[in-house]
């Protein structure tokens, strides 16, 4: 049986959907950045150009059939060759993931023809050659010059030896499994965005939910290591540049990504719900992100009156917004994403984490944020490990949050605000409230205490009027 007949027969045995996007899920990761291990060459996906649908096909049914045959070939290769050392259950997930990767346009390639020609010309160019027209090398194939895969896949030849047989592929491709594999692909991209790994270095809610998925249970690969390996393999196939270029357009980011084109010039469609998950500081900016999340709580708390570094709070929000508006240029893997190797600023939380953790420890001792090791490690909060930690601030926070009635709080604030040496930089405080979008009701509630000090109250009212 020739390859074309093999693919046709397998296609009739499997329930392949139309090539529509399979993606509409929501995930949440909060991990510190690591580096994803390299993928073994044995796990690369292979594409055979001979079976890629021709751009000259204009009849929709013929085009669909051509793409279905093509993705069956990709799935057969993933099943037998990529999945060679794995049990059948794992092979099935690899095959379905390959189908999703192609049909949803996650595979892409980069045009390097101009780079190659410019490099070759510049390396051999002499002033005496200026009148000689530049030419391509006639000894190299155009395809070799033009494009390289952007992801861990290669061009090659499918054979009956490296493709799964009809019997092996019977009922392998199924819509529920395709949906599940699409979910895994999106999860791997979100994990990469926030942690620089396709699988989070630490177990989180999303991988645990995927592990408990009925298909994982049904196929008997419900362990964390199996899911990590699956996400490691298929995450490497995907073009991160292509995926994030679509995300950038939907989120209106300042995109400096190296341009790529989808395999077969297809389009990658992502919903707003998907793109919204890729907002916030990328991998490499965890301290700044955490500082921002706690600072948002602080500026809405009465304790903001006591804080002495409004300038740093303003610097923090400025840094946070700058990183979020151009996340790929601040990602730890930015050299791959954008080609830039210039050093970025240091992620130090703008020198605020010591005092912010101290505030959170007393204001919200059971906050979910304390599940993150930057804030709490082995059941001990980490404020003292940061340079800005202040014993004076901790004493004040402890004393204030031990007050158990409104009357005692008012008495404490009255005594504090009327001290001769105490003052509030009202102008900077108002700026902080504006930058952090604090509601007017909250501003009014906090500023009401300024009445205990005529000096502070008059200054505040003058600025507000």
Image (cartoon, rainbow, N blue to C red):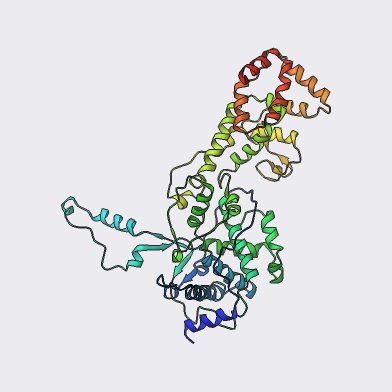
The residue at 23%/58% (across/down) is 134
The quarter holding residue 370 reads: top right
Residue 402 vertical placement versus 284 (above, below)? above
Residue 365 position in % (x across, y down): 76, 38
Residue 286 vertical placement versus 182 (above, below)? above
The residue at 67%/28% (across/down) is 390
The residue at 46%/74% (across/down) is 59
The answer to which of 130 and 4 lies nearer the viewer is: 4
The answer to which of 460 and 383 lies nearer the viewer is: 460
Q: In the image, 329: left or right of 463? A: left
For the C terminus, the quadrant is: top right
The answer to which of 351 and 93 lies nearer the viewer is: 93
Is residue 425 visible in this depiction of the protein?
Answer: no
Residue 141 position in % (x across, y down): 32, 68
Residue 310 vertical placement versus 10 (above, below)? above
Residue 129 position in % (x across, y down): 17, 54
The answer to which of 300 and 270 lies nearer the viewer is: 270
Q: Say how many tags the image has.
A: 0
Residue 314 position in % (x across, y down): 58, 30
The quarter holding residue 136 reads: bottom left
The residue at 56%/80% (across/down) is 10
């Amino acid at each position: 049986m020739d390859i074309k007949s093999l693919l046709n027969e397998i296609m009739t045995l499997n329930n392949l959907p139309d090539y529509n996007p399979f993606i509409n899920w929501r995930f949440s990761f909060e991990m510190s950045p690591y580096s994803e291990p390299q993928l073994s060459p044995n796990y690369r996906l292979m594409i055979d150009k001979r079976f890629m649908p021709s751009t000259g096909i204009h009849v929709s049914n013929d085009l669909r059939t051509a793409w279905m045959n093509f993705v069956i070939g990709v799935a057969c290769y993933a099943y037998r060759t990529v999945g060679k050392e794995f049990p059948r259950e794992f092979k099935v997930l690899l095959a379905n993931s390959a189908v999703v990767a192609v049909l949803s346009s996650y595979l892409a390639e980069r045009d390097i023809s101009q780079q190659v020609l410019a490099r070759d010309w510049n390396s051999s160019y002499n002033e005496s050659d200026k009148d000689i027209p530049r030419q391509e090398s006639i000894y190299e194939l155009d395809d070799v010059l033009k494009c390289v895969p952007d992801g861990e896949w290669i061009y090659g030849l499918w054979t009956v030896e490296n493709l799964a047989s009809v019997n092996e592929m019977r009922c392998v491709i199924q819509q529920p499994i395709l949906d599940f594999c699409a979910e895994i692909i999106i999860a791997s991209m979100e994990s990469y965005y926030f942690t620089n790994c396709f699988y989070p270095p630490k177990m989180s809610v999303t991988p645990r939910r995927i592990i408990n998925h009925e298909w994982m249970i049904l196929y008997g690969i419900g362990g964390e290591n199996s899911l990590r390996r699956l996400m490691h393999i298929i995450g490497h196939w995907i073009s991160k540049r292509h995926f994030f270029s679509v995300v950038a357009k939907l989120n209106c980011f300042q995109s400096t990504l190296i341009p790529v084109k989808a395999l077969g010039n297809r389009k990658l469609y992502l919903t707003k719900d998907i793109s919204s998950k890729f907002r916030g500081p990328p991998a490499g900016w965890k301290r700044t992100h955490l500082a921002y999340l706690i600072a948002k709580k602080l500026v809405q708390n009465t304790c903001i009156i006591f804080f002495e570094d409004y300038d740093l709070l303003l610097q923090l929000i400025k840094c946070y917004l700058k990183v979020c508006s151009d996340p790929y240029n601040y990602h730890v893997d930015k050299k791959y994403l954008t080609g830039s190797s210039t050093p970025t600023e240091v992620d130090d939380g703008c020198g605020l984490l010591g005092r912010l953790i101290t505030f959170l420890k007393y204001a919200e001792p059971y906050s979910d944020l304390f599940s993150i090791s930057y804030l709490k490690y082995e059941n001990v909060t980490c404020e003292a490990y940061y340079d800005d930690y202040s014993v004076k601030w901790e004493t004040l926070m402890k004393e204030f949050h031990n007050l158990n009635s409104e009357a005692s709080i008012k008495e404490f604030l009255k005594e504090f605000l009327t001290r001769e040496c105490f003052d509030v930089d009202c102008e900077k405080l108002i700026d902080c409230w504006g930058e952090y979008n604090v509601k007017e009701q909250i501003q009014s509630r906090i500023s009401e205490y300024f009445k205990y000090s005529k000096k502070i109250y008059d200054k505040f009212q003058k600025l507000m009027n």
